[in-house]
Amino acid sequence: MSDPGNVRRATMSDVARLAGVSIKTVSRVVNAESGVHPATAERVLAAIDQLGFRRNLSARNLRRGTGTGTLGLVLEDLANPFYSVLTRAVEEVARTRGKQVLTGSSDEDPARERELVLEFCARRVDGLVVVPAGHQHGYIAHEINAGTPVVFVDRPPGNLDADVVLIDNSGGTALAAEHLAAHGHREIAFLGDAPEIHTAAERLRGFREGCARAGVPFDPELVVMGPHTDESVAEALSTTLRRATALVTGNNRITIQALRALAGRPDRPALVGFDDFELADLLDPPVTVVTHETRALGRSAAELLFSRLDGDRSPPRRIVVPTQLLARGSGEVTR
């Protein structure tokens, strides 16, 4: 048995040699061009099948000046359902334009984000959609100036004026705080992600503004920010719920962790979570959430990218996808 690592890929020259034709004839057959006798074409196709020849589409498209037919998508974590939906939306738009999407997860690591972005650029992707992990994006300015369009999504880039598509993060948590206040709650806790993350900071800002609009005092001692595990969320709840009668959670992962910690607890607080999640409507009580069209976020980013690929040279755009509160039961518990 041959060593797979030592097997050479078949070339167009190999096909021409086996079929007994010129390389130009093989090229015509491969690219479905006219001018090749049917019997000759059949012989070339048989040689292609025998050798397992595959076209180098990237090289072909670059020679034609049509790009590589690929887009790069850099996410935080593809395992997160939020990013899975976003990825699917980008792929749906790309498919209609005959493009393939290459995806990588940064794991919230700025160095990994930069590594992925530059790797995709080295592979000559036609454009990039990036969920930023870091706050410094000057490293990509050269690629943008050289003609590679980049759209940032979910979070804005740092020190770079570029296209960005965002969720109305602050507006969503303001809705949550006002909703809980309308049901009589005066002591409302907030559990958010790491404060250096743009979305987390914006959601905290919106929560503070919602409290102010509802006439509810904002109490920093009822706010816990940072990376969360099941254990740290349980600990945060044991502290904040000594006083708070209601809770806003800053993303779907924290909401799920909070629900685990609250399971079986008789004095469960009223709860509004940011981001919907699977089976949230089947829990007891069903979970009230701040929701948004994640597909719209991904589609808007992809469509903006394609508008740039089509020649749009207008100034960088900022698109904000709206949020809404979906009342299901957990957020309507009165004080």
Image (tube, rainbow, N blue to C red):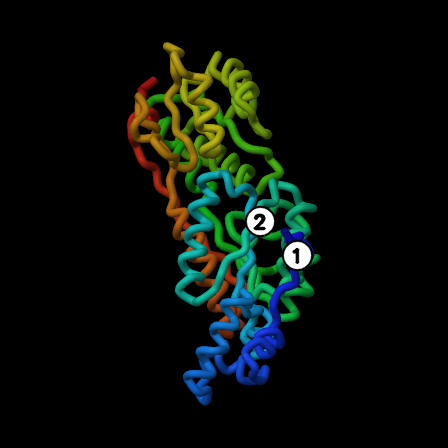
Tag shown at residue 170 = none
Q: Position of residue 199 (x, y in %)?
A: 53, 41
Please name the residue shown 39% across and 35% down the image: 277
N-terminal label among 1 and 2: 2
**Displayed quadrant of residue 121:** bottom right
User: What residue type is disc 1 on?
Assistant: Glu
Looking at the image, is 6 positioned above or below residue 330?
A: below
Please name the residue shown 65% across and 53% down the image: 2
Q: Residue furthest top?
A: 266
Looking at the image, is 153 positioned above or below residue 26?
A: above
Q: Determine whether the residue tagged by mark 1 lies in a helix, strand or loop.
A: helix
The residue closer to the viewer here, 263 or 118, is 118
Q: Residue furthest front?
A: 1
Disc 1: CA contacts within 10 A as few (<14), some (14-19) or many (>=20): few
Residue 315 visible in this rendered orientation of the protein: no
The residue closer to the viewer here, 91 or 317, is 91
Residue corresponding to mark 2: 104
